């Protein structure tokens, strides 16, 4: 059974930091590209950051320089360090595991709420 379990969300003041974690099980973690997505209230889900199997990273323009994605293949966990948080970062954050094989495979976590407010 595949599981992606996010943690680390919460309420933080503008300018603060949070570190999200996504612990996985049931997949060969090192073979998957991993990503963090978010869905603000009333909006569509969007890619925040991604890290490939080879550790190449990419970020949404809105978070470049503030967020850092990383992975630990031993712990089978992907992280998202979020600094200088803004109210517009408020959203449910989802972890994603992607295998571009045939057929491609996508797994999602249940999401964790991040609220940036004073």
Image (cartoon, rainbow, N blue to C red):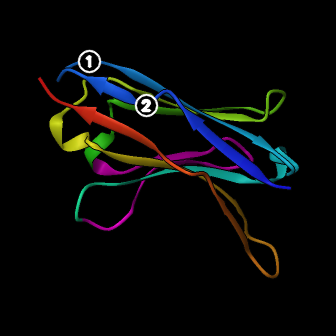
Q: Nearer the viewer, residue 28 or 65?
A: 28
Residue 14: percent from left, percent from top: 17, 23
| As drawn, 52 above or below 9 | below
| As drawn, 92 above or below 83 | below
Quadrant of the frame with the C terminus? top left
Q: Residue at x 33, y 23 (%)?
A: 83
Q: Quick one: label 2, few (<14), some, or many (20+) residues within 10 Å?
A: some
The quarter holding residue 86 reads top left
Q: Is residue 30 left or right of residue 14?
A: right
Cα distance, mark 2 to mark 1? 12 Å
Q: Residue at x 61, y 51 (%)?
A: 109
The quarter holding residue 102 reads bottom right
- Residue positioned most to the bottom: 103
Given this view, does label 2 or label 1 mark the residue nearer the observer? Answer: 2
Q: Which residue is mark 1?
A: 16
Q: Is residue 51 magenta?
A: yes
| Mark toward the start of the polypeptide (2 vs 1) | 2
Q: Residue at x 69, y 47 (%)?
A: 4
Q: Residue at x 26, y 42 (%)?
A: 90
Residue 71: percent from left, percent from top: 67, 33
| As drawn, 100 above or below 13 | below
Q: Is residue 60 magenta?
A: yes
Residue range highlighted in magenta: 43-61
- Residue positioned most to the left: 118
Q: Secondary structure at mark 1?
A: loop
Q: Secondary structure at mark 2?
A: loop
Q: Quick one: label 1, few (<14), some, or many (20+) residues within 10 Å?
A: some
The quarter holding residue 22 reads top right
Quadrant of the frame with the N terminus? bottom right
Q: Nearer the viewer, residue 11 or 15?
A: 11
Task: Report the disc number at residue 9.
Answer: 2
């Amino acid at each position: 059974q595949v599981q992606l379990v996010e943690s680390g969300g919460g309420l933080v003041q503008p300018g603060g930091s949070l570190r999200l974690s996504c612990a996985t099980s049931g997949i060969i973690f090192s073979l998957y590209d991993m990503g963090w997505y978010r869905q603000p209230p009333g909006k569509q889900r969007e890619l925040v950051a991604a890290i490939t199997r080879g550790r190449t990273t990419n970020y949404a323009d809105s978070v470049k320089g503030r967020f850092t994605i990383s992975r630990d293949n031993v712990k089978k966990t992907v992280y998202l360090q979020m600094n200088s948080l803004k109210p517009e970062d408020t959203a449910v954050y989802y972890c994603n595991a992607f295998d571009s094989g045939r057929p491609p495979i996508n797994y999602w976590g249940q999401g964790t709420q991040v609220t940036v407010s004073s």
